Image (tube, rainbow, N blue to C red):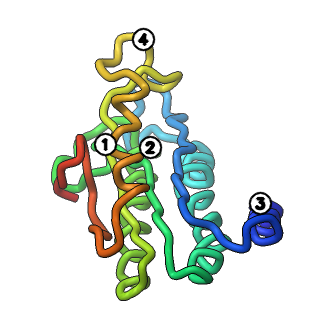
Amino acid sequence: IQRLGGFLERKYGAADILVNNAGIMADAKGTGMLGVQLQIIRTTMETNVYGPLTLCQVLIPLMRKKNYGRIVNISSGLGQLSEMGGGTPAYRISKTALNALTRTLAAELKGTNILVNSICPGWVKTDMGGPNAVKTLAEGADTAVWLATLPDGGASGGFYRDRKAISW
């Protein structure tokens, strides 16, 4: 991540857009909160929360150089507190934490032209979503691309699905 930041600074002098799309669901099917191994939670948090946080810490200073930036965190409806259920606890906790990261960064960057939002892409045909998922890759990426290209003064600190705000 540090090398990426250095490369972007040397080559372009700034960074414009960051889409934090890496994510894992390491929970075994059917695992509940009382059965999940702590190491599974740690591993999931490393990828789904600490990776995006570290990227933001390195790239936001580059965005500040041009007073322009768009950060899109790929979250999940499984991380919505308003609709929280059971199962896949490591994944759920990590996506809820990613949403908190989104809200915190948006608040800290208020008044700048750096916008930070989360999305739930829905059930997408990926390695994680599987072949029975209902959305194509293009459909799953649509809201992320929309948020990454918001005009100046656009929304920040929101959670979206299909280009519509959803509850946290």
Q: Earlier in the sequence, mark 3 or mark 2?
A: 3
- The residue singled out by tag 3 in the image is 4
Mark 3 or 2: the one toward you: 3
Q: Which mark is residue 52?
A: none
Mark 1 or 4: the one toward you: 4
- The residue singled out by tag 2 in the image is 91
- The residue singled out by tag 1 in the image is 78
- Residue in view at x 18 percent, y 49 percent: 164
Question: Which image quadrant is residue 136 in?
Answer: top left
* Circle 1 SS class: helix
Q: Earlier in the sequence, mark 4 or mark 3?
A: 3
The kind of residue on which mark 3 rests is: Leu
Mark 4 or 3: the one toward you: 3
- The residue singled out by tag 4 in the image is 131
Q: Earlier in the sequence, mark 1 or mark 4?
A: 1
- Disc 4 to disc 3, how far (Cα)? 33 Å
